[in-house]
């Protein structure tokens, strides 16, 4: 049984009437310590929060009731929807992040996360494709939870989808600035998965950010923003599973 400590944050409001919770957004805190993160997430002037925070040693804090709207996603887009705070549960994993010394998420932290997700998925009937990273829904602004996050391990338990395709080849197919049939196909696949792509014809900066986010999630061995053979194989597979 997961032991959850109550640590209420004032930073929440009501979800819109009729909002159905169907998404879980995973974050890292990106601060020097878990204590610093807890303080900030409970500071009324910061106006940020999450439903849960998980320390590296596996301790779990509940900051906001799941039924309420926590403020973790910010400006966000996914699968044609804006403002993911309306319909999601936000979970912060303590990790210094790319700014302060990004490091692997410890086993104890992930064990607690899996246990927490089991309860959330049951309570809200979250589908297998309802688990995303902050970087997926805000790719131009956010890098969390990043390429060290164990998405494959979550997917094994039914939290998220995964591809078994070989993603090792880094031979580049297309990069930013190019415009051809491949670009249209890849943009369409990114859109099918859920990424917000404005201009399907061009490999512009928005596509590059989406590719980076995709790689951090599904092809973490090389996060480049370039579409290479390995990325293309996995992209096609994930888009098919989604579509
Ligand atoms: Zn985040």
Image: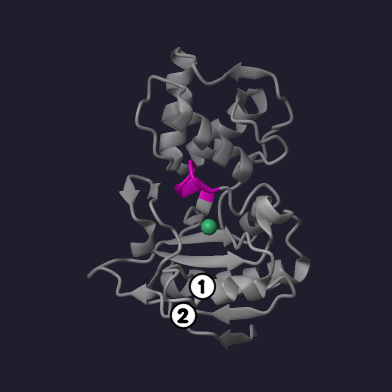
Determine the secondary structure under disc 2.
loop
Distance between the alpha carbons at the discs numbered 1 and 2: 7 Å
Q: Residues within 10 Å of mark 1 (few under 14, many from 20)?
A: many
The answer to whether the residue labelled 1 contacts the one labelled 2, judged by CB atoms less than 8 Å apart, is yes
Residues shaded magenta = 135-142
Residue 41 image position (x, y, % from top left): 51, 72
Q: Residue furthest front?
A: 45
Mark 2 residue CB less than 8 A from any atom of ligand 1: no
Relative to 96, 42 lies left or right? left
Pointer 1 or 2: first along the chain: 2
Quadrant of the rendering where the C terminus is positioned: top left
Residue 198 image position (x, y, % from top left): 35, 31
Determine the secondary structure under disc 1.
helix
Residue 212 image position (x, y, % from top left): 58, 36
Relative to 113, 44 lies left or right? left
> Quick check: 41 above or below 141?
below
Q: Residue at x 60, y 63 (%)?
A: 29
For residue 41, the mark is 1
Residue labelled with disc 2 = 9
């Amino acid at each position: 049984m997961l032991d959850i400590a109550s640590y209420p944050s004032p930073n929440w409001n009501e979800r819109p009437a009729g909002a159905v919770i169907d998404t879980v957004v995973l974050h890292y805190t990106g601060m020097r310590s878990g204590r610093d993160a807890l303080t900030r997430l409970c500071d009324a002037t910061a106006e940020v929060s999450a439903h849960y925070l998980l320390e590296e040693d596996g301790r779990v804090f509940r900051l906001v009731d799941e039924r309420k709207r926590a403020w973790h996603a910010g400006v966000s887009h996914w699968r044609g929807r804006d403002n993911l705070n309306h319909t999601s549960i936000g979970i912060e994993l303590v990790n210094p992040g790319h700014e302060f010394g990004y490091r692997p998420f410890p086993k104890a932290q992930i064990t607690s996360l899996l246990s927490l997700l089991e309860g959330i998925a049951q309570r809200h009937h979250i589908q297998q494709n309802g688990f995303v990273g902050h970087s997926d829904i805000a790719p131009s602004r956010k890098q969390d939870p990043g390429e060290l996050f164990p998405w494959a391990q979550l997917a094994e338990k039914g939290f998220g989808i995964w591809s078994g395709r070989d993603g090792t080849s880094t031979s580049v197919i297309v990069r930013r600035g190019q415009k051809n049939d491949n670009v249209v196909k890849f943009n369409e696949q990114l859109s099918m998965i859920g990424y917000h792509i404005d201009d399907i014809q061009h490999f512009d900066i928005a596509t590059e950010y989406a590719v980076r986010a995709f790689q951090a999630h599904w092809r973490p061995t090389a996060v480049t923003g370039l579409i290479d053979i390995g990325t293309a194989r996995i992209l096609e597979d994930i888009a098919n599973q989604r579509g």
